[in-house]
Image (cartoon, grey):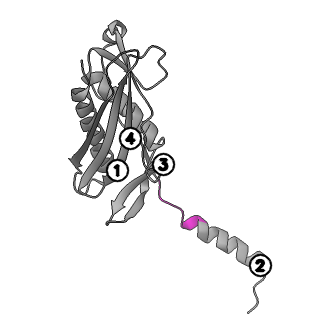
Amino acid sequence: MNCAPWRVLPIATILIGCTSNPDQSVYVMPAPTSLKPLAQVASGTLTLRLRPVILPDYLDTTDLVTRTGQYGISASQTGRWGERLSKGVTRALADNLGNRLPGYVVTDGPADSASAEIEVTISAFDVTQTTSVLAANWTVTWQGDNRPPIFHHGIFSTSVVPSGGDPAVVAAMAETVAELATDIATTTPK
């Protein structure tokens, strides 16, 4: 049987259309539920600038990635980030730090007169069906001050709600970032 190419092309197009991905939900790292009142922010005298958080390249994507086994990763077919993960983590971390450091104004944007800068490097942010684990190093460097830089590191772990799907993964990752913020806040001199 000899099929003309013009007959095969419409059928192939229909078949490709039928195998498209399911609808995807789009997620962002949530801000804390209790942000500082604006009056408190306006009265802050010291400013901490959070530099953009550094993530491994394979995580710095809009794919919602989970760990599969010791060496594999898998992108969700039903969910993705609304922004690159490094941007979402930076924003969420700055918001969480702002809540935990009431004597400071914390910004993730430009700050001409910052009292200190915080640099965070996340070396691992692995999420499985049961656990979210984040390993990070951070440095607090004081501007115009004789204090030496402060270096810290930590590993943070949060449980993922079983059978919760993408929303449970996102919630666990957000909680893990909040734990990192708590540790950074407790190691930053007041």
**Type of residue at label 2?**
Pro
Q: Secondary structure at mark 4?
A: strand
Tell me, for residue 124, which label it has, or none.
1
Cβ–Cβ under 8 Å for marks 1 and 3: no
Cβ–Cβ under 8 Å for marks 1 and 2: no
Numbered range of the magenta stretch: 17-23
| Local crowd size for mark 4, using a 10 Å CA cut-off: few (<14), some (14–19), many (≥20) | some
Q: Which callout, 4 or 2, points at the residue further toward the start of the chain?
A: 2
Label 1 vs label 3, nearer the camera: 1
Disc 4 target residue: 121
Cβ–Cβ under 8 Å for marks 3 and 2: no
Q: Secondary structure at mark 3?
A: loop
Q: Disc 1 versus disc 3: distance between alpha carbons?
A: 14 Å
Cβ–Cβ under 8 Å for marks 4 and 3: no
Q: Which callout, 1 or 3, points at the residue further toward the start of the chain?
A: 3
Q: Disc 3 versus disc 2: distance between alpha carbons?
A: 39 Å
Label 1 vs label 2, nearer the camera: 1
Name the residue nearer the viewer: 112 or 80. Answer: 112
Image location (x, y in percent) of residue 38 = 35, 12
Q: Disc 4 versus disc 3: distance between alpha carbons?
A: 16 Å
Q: Disc 1 versus disc 2: distance between alpha carbons?
A: 50 Å
Image location (x, y in percent) of residue 73 = 39, 61
Image location (x, y in percent) of residue 145 = 36, 15
Tell me, for residue 5, which label it has, or none.
2
Q: Disc 4 versus disc 1: distance between alpha carbons?
A: 9 Å
Image location (x, y in percent) of residue 134 = 29, 47
**Type of residue at label 1?**
Ala
